[in-house]
Amino acid sequence: MRIALASPPIPRSLTAGMQVLEELVKTASEERAEIICFPESYLPGYPGMGYAAEDRSPQSLSIALDRACEIARQNAIALILPMDWHSPEGLQNLAFVISSNGEILGHQTKNQLDPSEDDIWIAGTRRQLFEISGIKFGISICHEGFRYPESVRWAAQHGAKIVFHPHFAGSDDKGAVLSEWGSMQNPYYEKAMMMRSIENTIYFASINYASKYAESATSVINPDGTCLAYQPYGQTGVLIADIDPYLATGFLAGRFKNWLYKADGEAVSKAASPSGGA
């Protein structure tokens, strides 16, 4: 399966974000990718960065989602589109999954918020898998994949071959300029990517913005924890990678004994736990 990971600049507006989305989706389609994923909260842009209120309105976001569905259909490519979304519960950070026919297959919410985000979004409450071209995958958004490995293990135990990890780590204003992937001097993010992959024996695809002071690279990690490919820091573009789903066995995730970690009175039978890789 050929996947594409988009590393766009931090959008200056909803309109600018849509323009870059269309360009990068077209590039991925021309490279024969079957699915492309964008970074966290790509539309209308990460909160707190001075976006116009109109860009964040329910109507504007709904129009943008409809247009994204049309772009996916026109380019015959599936699309994972992280957005802020006005739900009945409140504003949520989520990622829509759109088929190559432009159909919305569902969405994954960010369920584990960073403490700094408690006043921005309402946390979601459920996880699910998706399927494109016969390949099952999960989505873990930013903080979840970095600090809550259970979100990735759940997907692996339920048959995911790959987990997509849209995130935002960095700034255009200040910070260090990274030069070596996985360096001991870098923030821990790339090491966490490696762990999410090797501890579950699946692929892990982590997607970041091409900011001037990026704290992690958009990367694809093999099931053995090695880096398959990454996008150079701060470089706008599309990372293309071919993955072999047969290598993503979920072996280590399947060996995890869920039933041993229940509090007294909450014990479940071994048969009731996910077998992993199913």
Image (spheres, rainbow, N blue to C red):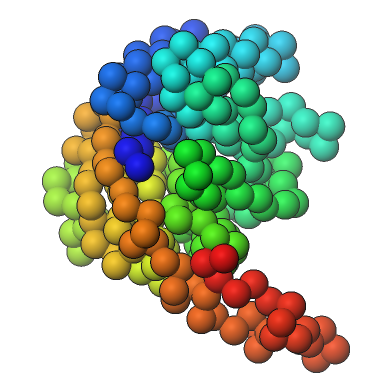
Which residue is drawn at the image coordinates 22% and 47% (left, top)? 229
Q: Visible in this render: residue 72? A: yes
| Residue 36 against residue 223 in the figure, above or below | above
Find residue 108 and report its horizontal and vertical position in percent.
63, 42
Q: Quadrant of residue 183?
A: bottom left
Total labels drawn = 0
| Residue 278 against residue 259 in the figure, above or below | above
Find residue 32 and report its horizontal and vertical position in percent.
30, 27
Q: Quadrant of residue 87?
A: top right
Which residue is drawn at the image coordinates 42% and 33% (left, top)? 35
Instruction: Please state which of residues 74 and 155 is positioned toward the viewer in this rendering.
Output: 74
Q: Visible in this render: residue 191? A: no
Q: In the visual, does 121 lie left or right of 73?
A: right
Find residue 175 and report its horizontal and vertical position in percent.
28, 41
| Residue 207 against residue 202 in the figure, above or below | above
For the N terminus, give its image quadrant. Answer: top left
Which residue is drawn at the image coordinates 72% and 47% (left, top)? 124
**Residue furthest toward the left?**
179
Find residue 11 and report its horizontal and vertical position in percent.
42, 19
| Residue 183 against residue 124 in the figure, above or below | below
Which residue is drawn at the image coordinates 27% and 35% (left, top)? 239
Instruction: Please state which of residues 85 and 228 is positioned toward the viewer in this rendering.
Output: 228
For the C terminus, give its image quadrant. Answer: bottom right
